[in-house]
Amino acid sequence: MARVLPLLIVAAATLLLTSIKSSTALKMASPGCRETCGNLTIPYPFGIGPGCYYKQGFDVSCEDNRTFMPNSSSRIQVYNISLLGGQIQVSTLIASKCNYTNGESTDGWVSVFTTPFFTLSSKANKLTAVGCNTVAFLGGYNKRRAQTGCVSLCLDKESVDFSGQCSGMGCCQTAIAPNLGSLNITFDKSFNNYVVNEFNPCSYAFVAEQDWFRFEASYLQDKKLTDKYKDGVPSVFDWVAGNQPCDEAVKNISSYACISRNSQCFNSPNVTGYLCSCSDGFEGNPYLADGCQDIDECQHPLQYPCYGICSNTVGGYSCSCAAGTRSKDPKTSVCSPDTASERAKLTKLLIAELLTRVKPVFSTPSSEVTSLASHFVSMMRDNRLCDILDPRIVEEGSTEDIKVVAGLAEACLRLKGEERPTMRQVEITLEDLQGSKVLPNSRMASSQNAIQDESYNGSNGSEGTRLYSLEKEFIQSSEIPR
C-alpha cells in the first residue's frame, strides 16, 4: 500500500520523546508572537518573526501553513518540535544521479547547513542509498570532517533483493557519524548506471529515520522514488539551548535559557549541550518567564491516580481516604471500610473478659442471656467485683492492681464516648502495671496477632483458653478515637 509522507510524519511523531501539548491555558510562544503555523505549535525558543525566537537558527518561517527552517541550500520543512526531547522532525531532500540509454546524465546532491544548536541525529537516522552499481557518501563536520557511505550492487534484475530489506543488492543502509552540523550527500562517479540503465537508470541517496524506509524494486525505475517523495523524506535533528553542559551554562545568567521559575536544566542525552524542563508537578514552557505552571493532578486521574479524596497542592497533590475508610496508600489502592474502630471496641472488652473469664455473651444462672459489657458495669456499680472475678486473677494479682484494671475496664465500657479513655490512655495505664500478675508477661508474649477462639466452657470446670495479643492491639489502636 502506498505510503504518503504526511501520514508517515504523523505516525512517526508519536515515537518522538515528548511532543508539545496544545493548550489554551499554557502559552508556548514568546508574548505577542504567533504561536502556530497551520496545525504545528511553535514553542519558544523557536519563533516566527523578529524578537520572537531565542537565537539565530531558532527562527522559522510560516508559508501556506507550512513551517520552514532557514538553510543555505535547501529549505527544511518542520513537522514536529519536541521541547523535552530536544528534537525536531523535518523533511530533507533526496540526492539523485541518472545515466540514460540516450547518453544523457544528471547529477544532483543535497547539502544542509545548520547553526551550532542543531545537529543531524545519529541515533534516529540512517543513510540510505537505492540503485544498482551505486556508492553514496554522507560527509559533514562535527569538530572535524566526518564521512560515511554504503555500496549497493546488482548486475541484473534477478540479482535485486525483493524482500524489502536493504541488503546491499538494490538498496543499502549505514549509520551516520554523531554531531554532524552540516552534511553533503554525494555519489562516487566512477560507479554509474550505464550497465543497468535499461531497468535502473537512476541512483538515490537520502538521510531518513531509522525504520521508516522499506525498499521496493519499483524504486529502481526512472524517478519512481523522487516522484513519490517529492517533498522529501522524514529526518530528525537534535537541538540544544546551549552547547555547554548544565554546570557551565548556569554560570552565565545572561544567556542561560532555563528562565522560568520551577524549571530545571538537564544535559541532552543525544548531543553535547543542555535543555530545560519544568520541575516535577509543573508543565508548560521552561524557556519563558513563568512558563512552568502548576499541574492540577486531580484533573488527570489516569496520570495521577487517587482512590480517595484528591487535593491539589503547588507542585504536587495529596490523596486521603474519606472518614471511616482506610488504605495503605490511597494513590495505589482503594480505600476500604475501616475496621480499626471495631478492633478498638473489642480490645476494650477484652480487659473485662480477661478479668472474669466470661464470654462476651453468656447465660446467667437464671438462664437469662446478657452481655459481658453490661453485666460487668452493673457488678462494678454494685461493688460486687469479687463475685465476677476469675479465681486465678484473685490468686495471682494484687488487690490494688485488680482494682486499677477493673476500673479501667469499667471506664472503657461506658456508653458515652466522652467518658471513655482513649486507647493511648489505656496503653499507658497497662504499661504502668507491667510486671503485675494481673497480666503476666509470659501470657503477653504468647499472644498472637488475632483472637484465637477455642472451646470455652465456664460451667463444667474444664477451663477453656482464649489468647490475646493485647499489647499489640493497644499499640495499634492507641490513637483511635473513643
Image (cartoon, grey):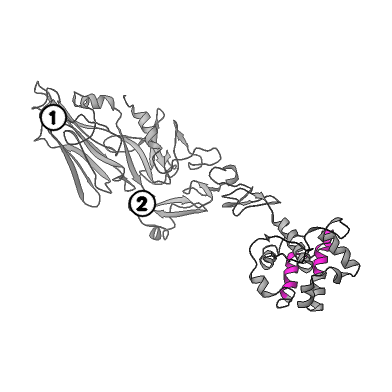
Rendered image: mark on residue 269? 2
Res 153 seen here = yes
Q: Which residue is mark 1?
A: 159
For label 2, the crowd category at 10 Å Cα-Cα, with few meaning under 14, some 14 to 19 and many 20 or more, is few
Q: Is residue 405 left or right of residue 465?
A: right
Residue 417 sits inside the magenta stretch? yes
Quadrant of residue 12 in the image? top left
For label 1, the crowd category at 10 Å Cα-Cα, with few meaning under 14, some 14 to 19 and many 20 or more, is few
Q: Is residue 108 above or below residue 466?
A: above
Q: Which residues are magenta?
A: 407-431
Report the residue at 31% width, 43% height from top. Answer: 124
Quadrant of residue 138 in the image? top left
Q: Give SS at disc 2.
A: loop
Q: Type of residue at label 1?
A: Ser
Quadrant of residue 129 in the image? top left
Kindly report the secondary structure that dominates the magenta region of the rendered protein: helix
Residue 345 sits inside the magenta stretch? no
Residue 18 locus on image (x, y percent): 43, 43
Q: Is residue 241 left or right of residue 351?
A: left
**Which of the pair 228/92 is nearer the observer?**
228
Q: Type of residue at label 2?
A: Pro
Residue 9 locus on image (x, y percent): 37, 33
Q: Is residue 192 above or below residue 30?
A: above
Which quadrant, please, contains the C terminus?
bottom right
